[in-house]
Amino acid sequence: MVNIITINWIIGGVAGILMFYASFITFMAAKKMTGELKKSILLLLGALLFYLFMGFGIGIMAVKDIHYSERVWLIISTFSLIGGILFVVGARKLFKVLLNVSENDKKINKKEVKK
């Protein structure tokens, strides 16, 4: 029978590969964008990468059996905090861009109705 730890490492490895691939696709798409939309997407991409590195760090420290009271665990907390901050800032910028697009669409629709 397969050990549950082995199954978890396989699932985690596949998730890591998929996250790197998603990061690559997102980066390639962001290269074609401009302005605030590009900034928001890159900030969200940065948050994804910090969460990915946080997950890898947890896995590595678990394998090395580093006790939770060691100071090196602050790296994991720091990655989590940085990822959270990047996500909030990126989401706010993206929300502003989408609101502007929505407002512009409403203005265009009003002009078409008047004609």
Image (spheres, rainbow, N blue to C red):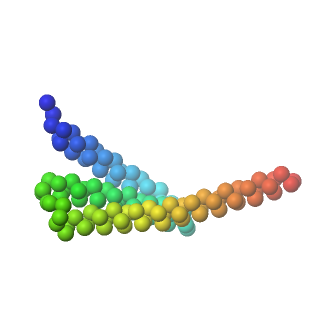
Residue 79 visible in the current orientation: yes
- Residue at the far top: name it: 1
3 vs 27, nearest the viewer: 3
| Residue 51 placement: quadrant | bottom left
- Residue at the far front: name it: 69
In the rendered structure, the answer to whether residue 65 lies left or right of residue 45 reads left
34 vs 48, nearest the viewer: 48
Number of labelled discs?
0
In the rendered structure, the answer to whether residue 45 lies left or right of residue 79 reads right
Q: In the image, residue 79 lies at what x, y percent?
A: 31, 64
110 vs 2, nearest the viewer: 2
In the rendered structure, the answer to whether residue 103 lies left or right of residue 26 reads right
At 15% from the left edge and 37% from the top edge, which residue is drawn? Answer: 3
On the rendered image, what quadrant is the N terminus found in?
top left
At 53% from the left edge and 63% from the top edge, which residue is drawn? Answer: 92
Rendered position, 17 above or below 4: below
At 16% from the left edge and 66% from the top edge, which residue is drawn? Answer: 70
99 vs 65, nearest the viewer: 65
- Residue at the far right: name it: 115
Q: In the image, residue 65 lies at what x, y percent?
A: 12, 56
In the rendered structure, the answer to whether residue 35 lies left or right of residue 21 reads right
| Residue 105 placement: quadrant | bottom right
At 29% from the left edge and 64% from the top edge, which residue is drawn? Answer: 77
Q: In the image, residue 50 lies at what x, y percent?
A: 34, 61
Residue 42 visible in the current orientation: no
